[in-house]
Image (cartoon, rainbow, N blue to C red):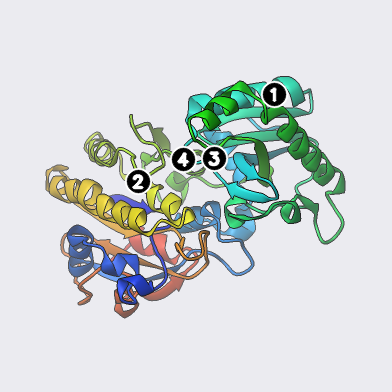
């Protein structure tokens, strides 16, 4: 049996008064997700272990069965793997957002819509002005980039920029850990943040963006730092996976996939935003399974970004797009794969539009394969899944159930 996971990043939400007290998953028109729930088994999954920040790096690697107490090193090293940056011992890798500041407030964690080509211009400029043998900036995707500091100390308190939309940014500058370690590195990061503001405010690209009514990318924001993680490939943990792949537009997920021993499949038009190529991702997953992959992880970022923007209508649209433009074609093609396919559907964490950042509540999940005994759940949502046969699970329980015997509640 082949295995396919469909992951709608940040798709879960809270009950919303404007939607008669329903969550977006309850309110959205999702007949194909509902079909999976009706014909499969459901439950709630705690993807964020106690004591960990509810980041996508924690949630997605937890879904794949990795114990965060053993492997967690932050986002930076995962994105380094995706970009192809080999980390040496002592290299501190940090996610480096290009953000928009407006006075004392962090207006936007992503500069609105920043194209990768624009980000590349600014990151190369910062490397020329601020980079040296110890400090190196690397271009990533859109607003998501990488900063590597040789000999950096990971014992830092760095606030993710998507946690402080429209809030004072100076209160969230990098600090040394509560134990007092990392003070030199924290001071260095603060210095780079302030210097980037001076360099970027009058950059021609930002002047052009402002003239077009767009947010300028006028500051860097480093966070999620760590060293190279030690992750055992899934092909070793689960021998039935002889070859697997990950399909995503996000460097973070690419990096997790690489450390997990999965090949990365690029899809033209995959943006990580609401306008991503859903159909292209669906066809890439179908083709990978037909071509011999035993395991495919399809990640779609769109709902998470809409949640960060606090945009109810857009997040609703992204959920319905996922259902109609990705889940539907996969379900239609599954019988043509040539081998039975187990399909799991879930978010990684909630990104409530009322909160505009991640939360740690358990998320709904569904597992379906031909012949599984349904549990009576009729729709895919946070509320309905609580009545599912799997109950509430955590740790590596999800991947073990999915990879071994999905019919065993």
Residue 289, percent across and down? Answer: 25, 40
Marks 4/2: CA–CA distance: 11 Å
Q: Nearer the viewer, residue 186 or 329?
A: 186
Q: Nearer the viewer, residue 175 or 74?
A: 175
Kind of element beneath mark 2: strand
Q: Quadrant of residue 20?
A: bottom left
Write down the residue under mark 2: 298
Tell me the residue at 81%/38% (across/down). 191
Write down the residue under mark 1: 127
Write down the residue under mark 3: 111
Query: What crowding class fits label 4: few (fewer than 14 Cα within 10 Å), some (14-19), or many (20 or more)?
Result: many
Q: Nearer the viewer, residue 298 or 222?
A: 222
Marks 3/4: CA–CA distance: 17 Å
Residue 346, percent across and down? Answer: 35, 60
Relative side of 202 to 353, left or right: right
Q: Are marks 3 and 4 in contact (CB under 8 Å)?
A: no
Among numbered discs 1 and 3, the one appearing first in the sequence:
3
**Viewer-nearest of discs 1 and 3:** 3
Q: Quadrant of residue 406?
A: bottom left
Kind of element beneath mark 3: loop
Tell me the residue at 79%/45% (across/down). 153
Relative to 111, is 7 above or below?
A: below
Q: Are marks 2 and 3 in contact (CB under 8 Å)?
A: no
Among numbered discs 4 and 1, the one appearing first in the sequence:
1
Find the residue positioned furthest to the bottom: 387
Write down the residue under mark 4: 250
Query: What crowding class fits label 1: few (fewer than 14 Cα within 10 Å), some (14-19), or many (20 or more)?
Result: some
């Amino acid at each position: 049996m082949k295995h396919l996971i469909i992951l709608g990043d940040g798709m879960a939400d809270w009950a919303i008064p404007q939607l008669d007290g329903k969550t977006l998953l309850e309110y959205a028109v999702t007949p194909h997700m509902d079909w999976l729930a009706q014909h499969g088994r459901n439950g709630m999954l705690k993807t964020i272990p106690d004591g960990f920040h509810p980041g996508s790096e924690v949630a997605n690697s937890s879904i794949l069965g990795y114990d965060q107490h053993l492997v967690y090193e932050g986002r930076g090293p995962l994105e380094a793997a995706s970009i192809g940056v080999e980390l040496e011992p002592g290299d501190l890798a940090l996610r480096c957002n290009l953000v928009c500041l407006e006075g004392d407030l962090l207006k936007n964690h992503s500069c609105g819509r920043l194209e990768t080509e624009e980000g590349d211009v600014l990151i190369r400029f910062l490397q020329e002005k601020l980079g040296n043998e110890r400090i190196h900036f690397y271009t990533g995707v859109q607003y998501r980039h990488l900063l590597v500091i040789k000999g950096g100390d990971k014992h830092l308190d760095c606030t993710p920029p998507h946690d402080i939309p429209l809030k004072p940014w100076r209160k969230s500058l990098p600090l040394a850990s509560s134990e007092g370690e990392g003070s030199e590195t924290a001071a260095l990061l603060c210095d780079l943040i302030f210097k980037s503001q001076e360099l970027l405010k009058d950059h021609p690209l930002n002047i052009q963006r402002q003239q077009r009514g767009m947010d300028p990318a006028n500051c860097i924001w480093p966070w999620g730092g760590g060293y190279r993680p030690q992750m055992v490939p899934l092909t070793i943990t689960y021998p039935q996976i002889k070859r697997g792949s990950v399909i995503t537009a996000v460097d973070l997920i690419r990096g997790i996939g690489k450390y997990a021993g999965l090949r990365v499949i690029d899809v033209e038009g995959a943006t990580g935003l609401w306008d991503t190529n859903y159909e292209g991702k669906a066809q890439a997953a179908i083709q990978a399974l037909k071509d011999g992959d035993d395991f495919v992880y399809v990640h779609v970022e769109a709902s998470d970004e809409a949640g960060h923007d606090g945009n109810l209508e857009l997040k609703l649209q992204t959920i319905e797009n996922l259902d109609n433009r990705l889940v539907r074609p996969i379900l239609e093609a599954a019988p043509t794969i040539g081998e039975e396919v187990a399909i799991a559907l879930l978010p990684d964490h909630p990104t409530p539009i009322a909160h505009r950042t991640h939360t740690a509540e358990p998320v709904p999940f569904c597992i379906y394969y031909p012949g599984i005994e349904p549990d009576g759940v009729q729709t895919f949502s946070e509320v309905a899944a609580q009545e599912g046969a799997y109950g509430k699970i955590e740790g590596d329980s999800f991947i073990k159930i999915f990879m071994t015997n999905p019919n065993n509640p």
